[in-house]
Amino acid sequence: MKLIGVAIAAASVALATASPAYAGKSTKNVLTAVDDCSMVCDGPTTVGTETTIGFTEAGLANPTFTEWLTFTNDLAGVYALTLDTSSSGIDFTSAILTGPGGPYELMEEFDNGISEFWNLSSLFLEAGTYTLTINGENRSTGSLGGTVTINAVPEPGTWAMMLLGFGAAGFAMRRRRAPVLAQMA
């Protein structure tokens, strides 16, 4: 019985120390709203641990442009932020997130001349208002479309505590059962 108590306590600690951004996602949207946007923005839409903001702009400046969107994050935690587009003739030159603790620069991960994917992983965002500024070159189409995706990321300590709690619970359950011998009356 003592081991079961230890296992329950360990599991409780694992859940209590979970990353707020990850643990809170099942009951609350991390982003309450897109506060302002220089483009046409759609969202935020939250499914599970992923929040997506769609954006489009038909009248881009030529040859260079700067577009931005401002959003509010209600829940501090560790996040991954991605930016993508499949607008041919558009080339992002930089993407910078400013806000509490920033600025943070997204890094280009993929660009095949048609689609681009920029990423910023394992970023601790405090609760507050953030602005994502997208700079780029417009070589032909004059229109831009894509998404900004923000994912809550569980912290490594959360995984370690959770695994420790499950291991302790399994150990307690295994040790709990003593063999019962049949008795003859």
Image: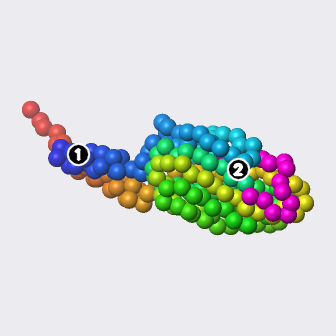
Residue for badge 1: 4
Compared with 115, 128 (above or below) is above
Which residue is more in the foreground, 104 or 48? 104
Let me know if residue 179 is in the magenta part: no
* Amino acid type shown at disc 1: Ile
Of discs 2 and 1, which sits in the foreground?
Answer: 2
Q: Closer to the N terminus: mark 2 or mark 1?
A: 1
Residue for badge 2: 147
Counting from the top left corner in percent of width and height, residue 103 is at 56, 63
Image check: 59 left or right of 78? right
Can residue 132 be seen from the camera position used here? Answer: yes
Compared with 28, 144 (above or below) is below
- Span highlighted in magenta in the image: 53-66
* Amino acid type shown at disc 2: Thr
Q: Residue at x 62, y 42 (%)?
A: 34
Q: Secondary structure at mark 2?
A: strand
Image check: 173 left or right of 115? left
Q: Residue at x 78, y 47 (%)?
A: 56
Counting from the top left corner in percent of width and height, residue 108 is at 68, 67
Q: Residue furthest top?
A: 185
Which image quarter is the C terminus in?
A: top left
Let me know if residue 57 is in the magenta part: yes
Which residue is more in the foreground, 184 or 172? 172
